[in-house]
Amino acid sequence: MTGLPRSTAGTAGIPSTAGAPSTAGAPSTAGAPGTGSATGTTTTIGTAAIRISEEVVQAVADGRPVVALESTIFTHGLPRPRNLAVALEAEEQLRGAGVVPATIGVHSGVPTVGLSTEQITELAATDGLDKVSLRDLPVVAALGRHGGTTVAATAFLAHRAGVRVFSTGGLGGVHFGASESFDESADLTTLAATPVTVISAGVKSILDIRATLERFETLNIPVIGYRTTKYPGFYVTDSGHEINFAVRSPEEAAAVIDARDRLDLPQAVLVANPVDPAKQLPPEELDGILARARAEAERRGITGNASTPFLLDHIQRDTGGRSLEVNVEVYRGNVRLGGEIAVALSARAGGSAPASAGA
């Protein structure tokens, strides 16, 4: 696998894969059209511009904790008006812990790290947005389109901005029948070449979890449980699959991340954070729900990128909306843990203390 290009030392605003990134000398875009209140720095990779909000640039430069958040959860994953409420709540949750949120998406063709409230509101209210994976970034940039970024695109952009921690809901992975269809998320190969830390509640329950864990192993992507070696299944605390390692605290997770960076390894660290058992879907119901969802997708001939949103929507309807509440709880828990790990990383690096420290 060729992987993503490694950053070039001295390139303005583009971090190296090891150590703290340098944003010195990056050109300002303050006042540039389309930035809303998220004015900041534009850095370039080849000919494609990435806008990084001034708040994120300064926090990264100061060594303060920052957590990346993806946009597909509010552009494609949740219904209105819940989508906007959850997106803004996640940012407020991080700020309350002294952590800078960096919500990532594509606004008017510009991949943006640190969307403004106005931009988040606009994306959350826009119909027909593109679901932007890494391969789609140059297309939507060239065509000037809005888009919600997937795990793959968000991880890539977060790393290029120097953001080390990324909280999401569930990861993409290997679909059932992939041995014939080759239906496998781009999240896997991107994370194999992008040294961020991703906090999730496992891969989405609609996927072949066993095959996905095998692919993580093949791609040398470490998977560590948060206080458990039972790999979570997004809607449920335990997918029925074991993993080898667990960490007991944000500080232990930060130590693993620092060890990865000292070894100059290129892959992500995945932290599997299970949903509270009291808030999971009843595990005894899940198999039947998933079987009905897959059967309906097959009957309608829905495959590829369309399959995940269809299956998740079917599950939501089948559960009378209970799965939506689990989805939101999963996300809250991962945002919380992401903030704690970002604070621990900042402390290890001797960065500035969060504003709420000691409160």
Image (cartoon, grey):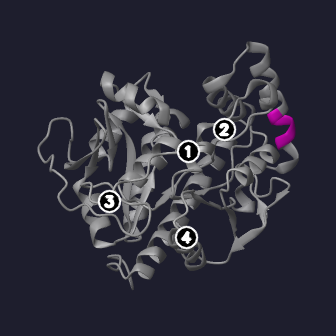
140 is within the stretch colored magenta: no
Q: CA distance from mark 1 to mark 3?
A: 21 Å
Residue 72, given in percent of the width and then of the height, sits at 49, 38
Q: What is the distance, in whole Å, between disc 4 and disc 2 at their CAs?
A: 45 Å
Q: Which residue is mark 2?
A: 321
Task: For label 2, count other residues whose C-alpha is less than 10 Å away and answer few (under 14), some (14-19) or many (20+).
Answer: few
Q: Mark 4: which amino acid?
A: Leu
Disc 1 designates what residue?
190
Element type where label 2 sits in the image: loop
Which residue appears at 47% of the width and 41% of the height?
Answer: 153
- What type is the residue that disc 2 sits on? Gly
Q: Secondary structure at mark 4?
A: loop
Q: Main secondary structure of the magenta part?
A: helix
As drawn, the label of residue 280 is: none
Res. 22 image quadrant: bottom left
Specify the farthest residue to the top: 300
Where's residue 9, x and y in %?
Answer: 32, 59
- Which residue type does callout 1 highlight? Thr
Mark 4 or mark 2: which comes first in sequence? 4
Mark earlier in primary sequence (4, 1)? 1
